[in-house]
Image: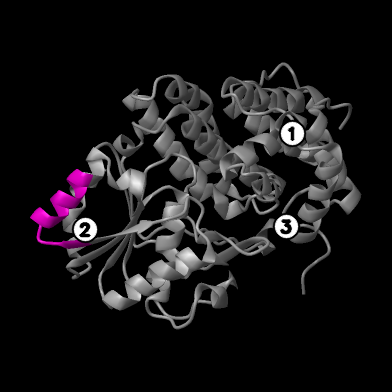
Amino acid sequence: MRSNYFNPFEELYIFSSPSKIIFGVGALEKVADEFRTFNQKKILMITDKVISETEPVKNFLSFLSENHFEPKVFISETQEPTVDMVNKFIHFVRSEKEGIVVGLGGGSIMDQAKVAAALAKNEGEIEHYIGVDKIKNDGLPLVLIPTTAGTGAETTKNAVFKGPDRKMIVSTQKILPSLAVIDPLLTLSLPPRPTAFTGMDALSHAIESVISTKCNSLVMATSLEAISLINKNLPLVYYSGYDVQARYNMSLAATLAGLSLNGGAVLAHSVSYTLEHFGIPHGLGCAIALPQVIKFNAPVIADKLKSIAKALDLYDERIDDPVETASYVVERVNQLNAMFGIPLTLESISISKEKARELGEECYAKFPRPNNPRTYSKEDIIKLYELMWSGDLTIDNM
């Protein structure tokens, strides 16, 4: 029986990760030997039209053919995967019976690859597997290759899809990749805005994972290093996309931030799901929400905010005031948003105050976060949205 006080020795932590990660400049050219270990000739690749026409991907497909593999490419037709699109790729993979499933692209592409590889050896449509640990059989070998530095999908056991009226999530160890290949060169041509949005998504992963009640030493280590790398390098890649060293550091940060999600995201991700009604990309939604979510939780995470402030190069050991530390962290995240042209209020993206309240009600009802450290009521979440609408980031007391 558990005692009624916190005892760290009673807590059980599970840290999930890919079976193997290859990271570095030119990593894509080193995978042939790894692919051979799967004893499969077919490469069942999913990507999108834009990525498929880039020079690095054309070269990669030629490289696979030269090494006696048989690449077959499936082009995803939607930027955000719907249930129907996911099922189309699942059927494609099943029709081939065997092969290595490769997801080459952003988070949406990799999420489709994750469930298709797993369901190749399980019956039914994706709708039957929404939830936690519902996939029983092991699937086909899965390789994930990100072309952005943000989502961390190549390192996580979650896949997210657009359902009829809400986000649908599959969460299981069965969709972790056999191999993740992170080559920073694939991110060089990413334009500034998606660079910023995906980079702020990674920052959200890292900061939210520190804030989470499920944070542990492994999560803290990966999160704080990711925060430091993003703080220093995201401005560089936003203004100078072909800075290979900065792209390298951002790819590393995104990978670490993905691993940090073992701690679990908190309310910023829930808010982002509601903002997608307005066509706001996930990473942008997280960025908009993050300053207010840090402020909301500040009264119960004073020690964690010190660690975050140090990672952001903000904390001075001579200043030990929790309100000031919280203000520094919130203001720095807001400064990054402003630097990248990210809206600082919901009002600035034409969301009415009344609609903001409705979104707050939806967030509370559909996207609960039991690992958020500050407990909350529906009225608290509505107030959070009202503050996002006005942009008031004042921290009065803690």
Single out the mark in the foreground, 1 or 3: 1
Percent coordinates x, y for residue 172 in the rendering:
52, 68
Which residue lies under the disc numbered 3?
A: 367
The amino acid at mark 2 is Glu
Q: Quarter of the image holding residue 23?
A: top left
- Identify whether 334 is placed above or below 367: above
Q: Which of marks 3 and 2 precedes in the sequence?
A: 2
Which residue lies under the disc numbered 1?
A: 350
The amino acid at mark 1 is Ser
Q: Is residue 32 among what the camera can see?
A: yes
Identify the element where label 1 is drawn.
loop
Q: CA distance from mark 1 to mark 3?
A: 23 Å
Q: Is residue 374 among what the camera can see?
A: no
Q: Which mark is residue 34?
A: 2
Percent coordinates x, y for residue 151 in the rendering:
49, 46
The stretch in magenta equals 58-71
Percent coordinates x, y for residue 227 in the rendering:
55, 33
